[in-house]
Image (tube, grey):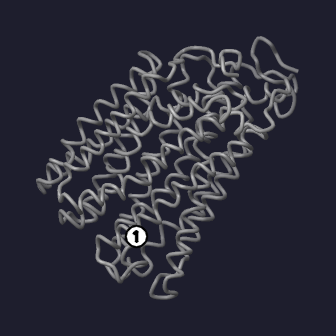
Amino acid sequence: MIDKRSRVVTGNPLPEKGVLSAQEHRSQVRRAVLASTIGTTIEWYDFFLYGIATGLVFARLFFPSSSPLVGTLQAFAIYFAAFVSRPLGAALFGHYGDRLGRKTTLIATLLVMGLATFLIGLLPTYAQIGTSAALILAVLRFLQGVGVGGEWGGSVLVAMEWARTPSHRGFIASWPQLGVPLGLLLANAVVLFSSQFSGQAFLSWGWRVPFWLSAALIGIGLYIRVRVLETPQFRILVAERRLEKRPVLVVLRKHLREVLLAALARVGEQAPSYVFSTFVYSYATTMLGVSRDFLLGWQLIGSLIACIATPFFGFVSDRVGRRRTYLIGIVSTAIFGFAYFSLLETRSPVLVCVALISSSIPPSIMYGPQAALIAETFPSRVRYSGASLAYHLASVLAGGTTPLIATTLIVHYHTGTAVAFYVLACAAVSFVATLFLKDRTNQRIDDSDYAAS
């Protein structure tokens, strides 16, 4: 049974009277936002650990016979494996998220990611088992991608579908986005702590500590997520028997245009983000002579700024419009790319600090409203599948490929300006795609409002 005024489905596990009170609903909103934010933080902590370790130690541990640049390229090639598997995870978990519910699926994604990350911390190196080490690393990295492929869509929907009014969706949906800067901050902090061991100790076992810590974090995430109720919108679908049997196929048949546009719109945020958060480690340490601890420390400050900027711009998008805010972010990021590498290449500690700290702001202008912009594009009965596929298709196009492309550009042109032009090209693609996305800011997102449904 459904209460037509509140649109909250009655029955277990809701209270005995069947309808959530206003206070109970507010409590569920807070719990859903907390569960989504902490869960995504843990997932992205796991995911970013590999990127940081790639720039710092993996080339030496798993490809010791290669030159520093070639070894970095080989390590980033395995890094890319997770981006290939992310759409697979999006399709797999998107199917179950639209069939079984957002909550159940999110618990599964957390377990997949956590197990893969913990096992990386136990992995023997090239010196111990030869080339098999790199092969096993690739398999575990692939599983990381599967896990994170199902995480984003579910965490955003758990938060957004509990929003009380359309005017809060951008702000509410931006909180799970904090998982990226918080995960990056946590990963940087733990690696920075581990790097205080002597050089040899860090190479032999110190780098493993952050991966082992994942096991404890997963336990915390599971405890929080099991206490969240299923979202009202999904419970309505269940009660009205409107679940799709094959949601992924429905998305590809009826909403392929929206999937492609949303993916391309994200390219201009995805590529710069991985330039600023991952590629910079190998570039700055091998080409510019910047110390590892210096980078880790100032990246922490940048991540803290992103934690403030992301929900702020989600809030702004509720006031001035999702698409308008996003377009401003695209233009800002395109321009900033040139300033970023100019500052880095001065090798001046002060100016490098400015580059590292400020690099979190332009992408945050996009990342804040991005969750709502993408999720609002799809009707609720296929929203998990559609939003996840769009988000992670962009990760293949411009996420995993970016460190490889950026490293290749540096090898050929020996200047970061070449990478800045790459960022500009990605921004141009996103700008055009975003113009074609429908802006549903402050509008209802019931299935009846989607013509393709």
Residue at point 55%, 52% (across, down): 43
Image quadrant holding the N terminus, namely: top right
> Closest to the observer: 319 or 196?
319
> Closest to the observer: 280 or 167?
280
**Residue 126 seen in the current view:** yes
- Looking at the image, the residue that sits furthest to the bottom is 128
Q: In the visual, does 344 lie left or right of 229?
A: left
SS assignment at label 1: helix
Residue identified by numbered label 1: 74
Residue at point 39%, 62% (across, down): 52
Q: Is residue 259 above or below residue 448?
A: below
> Closest to the observer: 202 or 336?
336
Q: Is residue 105 above or below residue 258?
A: below
Classify residue 139 by image quadrant.
bottom right
Classify residue 198 by image quadrant.
bottom left
Image quadrant holding the C terminus, namely: top right
> Closest to the observer: 417 or 168?
417
Return the x and y of residue 49 as percentages of the image width and height: 45, 61
Classify residue 3 by image quadrant.
top right
**Residue 31 seen in the current view:** no
Q: In the visual, does 443 lie left or right of 27?
A: left
Residue at point 41%, 54% (across, down): 401
Q: Is residue 410 above or below residue 263?
A: below
Return the x and y of residue 36 as percentages of the image width and height: 59, 41
Total marks shown come to 1
Q: Is residue 333 above or below residue 20?
A: below
Q: Amino acid at mark 1?
A: Gln
Please rate how many residues cluster around mark 1, counting C-alpha atoms within 10 Å: few if below 14, some from 14 to 19, many from 20: many
- Looking at the image, the residue that sits furthest to the top is 5
Return the x and y of residue 351 as percentages of the image width and height: 14, 48
Return the x and y of residue 33 as percentages of the image width and height: 59, 35
